[in-house]
């Protein structure tokens, strides 16, 4: 079996997690992804900067963002280094980057310069806030983009600090991969390359709830304040109720008429209770009262009880889990959403796997994340046809090698 | 202007959110997307008002935005003639997409085994709830799946309820992932001449969506990644949310001594820079609760605009935490077409919609129309695409196969 993108070569000059991950996605599905590390640029990404990811020798986020890639380290300022880049570009289909445009200009890695080397190159670019507008050059941090996008204040309960979830950047990563595929499709049809842009701001815009579109349509200030969990428009769709052992139960039964008889039985309410015997009453005049009643009912039993009862009746409702659940879920493993691996240097580990199942060209883990410059000599020899003596010469001149400080 | 997916035809047998969003991405970039619906009610999302779980307004923004640029064909797939008609469409299409349960597709005779016989070049894409490997029929609304991944449980302050990321927030990721899968399969088909089946499930997409914390949890098992963490004990107090006089702001400073000195300058509290408790990143980490409390008290003295201006003048990254009203007027969003104004026939006026988050320089996406009326293109598609005589169309109408 082959990878869908086995005939595609991607040059990956990315810095941030979201943009690197776009390259890994293309690699997962078969592309040859060459990560180009510029030795003249000392900047490296520090996942620890938010204080959430303590510096460790081996970083699982780097492992995810750079798997299925080869690494080439070269000094792009030196003419001999520049020559290597130019030869790589001439044989590439996609140039993927999130380096700020001013820096790309300096390095001669802007779209126009690369087009001169490979006229139909797909130039895929990640940024913080998009290719146009007054803030196009602001730093590309997901937190800054999420803050701009509008739902952080309304996610928590009233009175609580705004919430940052980190999922916006995950949308941007897939948007970069999807945009690249759209452009590749067009190139195959018409022979022309182009620039593809996706930003953290745009990704966050689509990662957030439907309230965004609802606000645009209705312009009602009630979308600007957080709602109490006991003030849902529908007591059986949206609210969360605590169990006796501090688990939380969510309900997703928007069509309350359909589920009411079975649900009433589980929570010990009379199906014919005159306060709650129609959808209109449940979602109308007795809405708040019903949520109070349910809040009391759910507090009487542990989460395991509710899970069992809800599952037995196949009701769309859940007891909210923690990451321990998917980590030991055999279905997540059966679908390869989570992999149990024997890492060559770190032993048995768990890692996220592949979100898309394909029957004929499945994703594969062909390589774990490379060390910086691990494949430099191999790429020069096999892809660019450099003689061994020339490679040694370039190494001796310090044009090839490992990242400073690595 | 040319469109990237010109000439690609998609049979979009989907309902509600995840499936329609997937097809929306393809339609935005020029694919001919035919939203196939049942006569009578059509896609359940046409009746979204009645569920009362989401405010809709005077035009059905839920359905119309994600089904933009699409055609609608109504056909009764419970009738054998409806299935035959669908097979004829399959012969002329590149992609079949569905987020109905596998059982429905079996009943309608629309399995991969059946459709690949009809058209070996077909890309057969499904959006299941919990993956292709096992047939799991438990409900798979967005929140059912969000509840399982564990992502909700780590949001918010300790002791607070878990946080739902919002209606549809996971569905849209599943849709995006599915669109990527379809493009991958189209690329493979160009080389091999054959289609394939693919599945992008809501569970698979949402697990991947949780990567920034789920991946380190899988690697380390540490509760730091799986449980609620208080902003009052931020590991890096310079990378944190702070309440200022009028709203909240997000400070995003890497914890370097230079940044700390610059922040003290912008706060007009130069003496803090030499405070022994905070003199290095290690010390600031050790005294994080004190430092957050201190910054809380200093920052609340001024409005957000004042702080953002001061931070920007010193090159310190920070942003006001906007609400939906702020973002709806954000020039940056409009200039990049992340928000668009389009005409809505349902209310006969211009309306604002979520726009185009992927920008292609030579074949840009576009929104030509909002979602179609139920079955509005049925007759034309039968005549033009399937070259059906009017007599047969009348016959199908009489038998209730099409409206």
Image (cartoon, grey):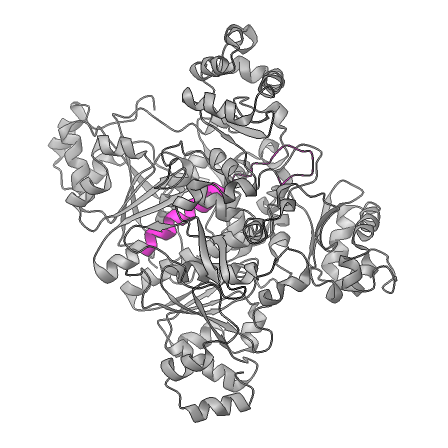
Residue B81 place in picture, x, y as percent: 50, 86
Viewer-closest of A114 and B272: B272
Could you tell me if residue A356 is visible in this image? no
Instruction: Check the image and report above or below for A400 versus B298.
Output: below
Residue A326 falls inside the magenta stretch: no
The magenta-colored residue range is A154-182
Residue A155 falls inside the magenta stretch: yes
Residue B17 place in picture, x, y as percent: 54, 60
Asked which quadrant contains residue A59, the reply is top left
* Residue that protrudes farthest toward the front in the picture: B349
In the rendered image, the quadrant that contains the C terminus of chain A is: top left
Residue B150 place in picture, x, y as percent: 61, 44
Could you tell me if residue B306 is visible in this image? yes
Residue found at x 50% / y 89%:
B396
In the rendered image, the quadrant that contains the N terminus of chain A is: bottom left
Viewer-closest of A350 and B57: B57
Asked which quadrant contains residue B7, the reply is bottom left
Task: Classify residue A371 as left or right of residue A92.
Answer: right
Instruction: Check the image and report above or below for A110 versus A118.
Output: above
Viewer-closest of A357 and A367: A357
Task: Classify residue A321 as left or right of residue B81.
Answer: right
Residue found at x 55% / y 66%:
B15
Residue found at x 47% / y 20%:
B255
Number of numbered callouts drawn: 0
Task: Classify residue A282 as left or right of residue A106.
Answer: right
Viewer-closest of A8 and A395: A8
Residue A207 place in picture, x, y as percent: 51, 47
């Amino acid at each position: 079996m082959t990878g869908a993108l086995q005939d595609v070569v991607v040059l990956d000059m990315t810095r941030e997690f979201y943009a690197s991950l776009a390259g890994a996605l293309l690699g997962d599905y078969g592309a040859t992804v060459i990560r180009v590390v510029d030795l003249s640029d000392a900047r490296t990404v520090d996942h620890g900067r938010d204080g959430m990811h303590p510096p460790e020798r081996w970083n699982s986020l780097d492992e995810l963002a750079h798997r299925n890639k080869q690494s080439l380290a070269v000094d792009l300022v030196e003419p001999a280094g520049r020559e290597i880049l130019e030869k790589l570009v001439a044989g590439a289909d996609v140039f993927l980057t999130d380096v700020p445009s001013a820096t790309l200009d300096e390095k001669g890695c802007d779209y126009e310069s690369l087009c001169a080397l490979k006229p139909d190159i797909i130039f895929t670019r990640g940024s913080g806030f998009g290719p146009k507008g007054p803030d196009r050059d602001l730093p590309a941090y997901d937190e800054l983009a999420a803050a701009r996008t509008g739902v952080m204040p309304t996610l928590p309960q009233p009175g609580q600090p705004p919430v940052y979830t980190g999922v916006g950047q995950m949308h941007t990563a897939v948007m970069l991969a999807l945009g690249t595929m759209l452009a590749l499709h067009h190139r195959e049809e018409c022979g022309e390359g182009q620039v593809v842009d996706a930003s953290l701001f745009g990704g966050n815009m689509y990662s957030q709830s439907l309230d965004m579109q609802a606000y645009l349509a209705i312009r009602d200030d009630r979308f600007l304040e957080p709602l109490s969990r006991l003030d849902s428009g529908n007591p059986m769709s949206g609210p969360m109720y605590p169990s006796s052992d501090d688990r939380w139960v969510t309900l997703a039964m928007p069509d309350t008429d359909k589920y009411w008889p079975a649900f009433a039985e589980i929570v010990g309410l009379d199906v014919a209770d005159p306060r709650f015997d129609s959808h209109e009453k449940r979602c109308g005049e007795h809405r708040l009262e019903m949520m109070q009643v349910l809040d009391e009912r759910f507090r009487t039993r542990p989460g395991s009880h509710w899970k069992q009862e809800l599952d037995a009746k196949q009701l769309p409702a859940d007891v909210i889990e923690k990451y321990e659940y998917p980590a030991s879920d055999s279905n997540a493993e059966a679908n390869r959403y989570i992999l149990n691996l024997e890492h060559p240097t770190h032993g048995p580990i768990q890692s996220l796997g592949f979100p898309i199942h394909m029957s004929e060209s499945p994703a594969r883990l062909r390589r774990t994340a490379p060390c910086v410059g691990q494949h430099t000599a191999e790429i020069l020899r096999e892809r660019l046809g450099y003689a061994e003596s020339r490679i040694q010469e370039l190494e001796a001149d310090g044009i090839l090698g490992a990242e400073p400080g690595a | 202007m040319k469109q990237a997916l010109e000439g690609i035809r998609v049979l979009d047998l989907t309902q509600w959110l995840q499936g329609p969003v997937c097809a929306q991405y393809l339609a935005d970039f020029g694919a001919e997307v035919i939203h196939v619906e049942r006569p009578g009610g059509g896609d359940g999302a046409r009746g979204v008002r009645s569920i009362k779980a989401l405010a809709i307004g005077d035009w059905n923004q839920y359905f119309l935005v994600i089904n933009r640029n699409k055609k609608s064909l109504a056909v009764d797939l419970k009738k054998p003639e409806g299935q035959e008609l669908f097979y004829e469409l399959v012969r002329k299409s590149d992609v079949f997409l569905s987020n109905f349960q596998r059982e429905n597709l079996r009943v309608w005779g629309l399995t991969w085994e059946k459709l690949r016989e009809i058209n070996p070049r077909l890309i057969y894409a499904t959006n299941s709830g919990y993956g292709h490997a096992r047939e799991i029929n438990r409900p798979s609304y967005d929140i059912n799946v969000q509840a399982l991944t564990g992502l909700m449980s780590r949001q918010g302050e300790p002791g607070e309820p878990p946080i739902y990321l919002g209606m549809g927030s996971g569905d849209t990721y599943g849709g995006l992932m599915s669109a990527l899968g379809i493009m991958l399969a189209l690329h493979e088909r160009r080389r091999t001449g054959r289609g394939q089946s693919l599945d992008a499930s809501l569970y698979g997409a949402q697990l991947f969506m949780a990567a920034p914390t789920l991946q380190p949890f899988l690697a380390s098992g540490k509760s730091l990644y799986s449980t609620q963490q208080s902003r009052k004990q931020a590991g890096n107090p310079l990378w944190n949310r702070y309440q200022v006089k009028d709203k909240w702001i997000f400070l995003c400073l890497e914890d370097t001594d230079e940044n700390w000195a610059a922040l003290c300058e912008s706060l007009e509290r130069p003496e803090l820079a030499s405070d022994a408790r905070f003199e290095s990143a290690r010390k600031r980490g050790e005294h994080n609760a004190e430092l957050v409390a201190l910054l809380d008290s200093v920052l609340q003295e001024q409005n957000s605009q004042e702080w953002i201006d001061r931070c920007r003048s010193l090159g310190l990254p920070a942003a006001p935490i906007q609400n939906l009203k702020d973002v709806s007027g954000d020039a940056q969003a409009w200039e990049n077409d992340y928000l668009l104004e389009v005409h809505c026939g349902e209310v006969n006026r211009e309306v604002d919609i979520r726009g185009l988050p992927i920008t292609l320089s030579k074949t840009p996406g576009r929104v030509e129309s909002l979602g179609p009326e139920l079955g509005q293109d049925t007759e034309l598609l039968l005549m033009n695409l399937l070259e059906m005589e009017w007599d047969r169309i009348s016959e199908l109408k009489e038998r209730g196969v099409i409206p």
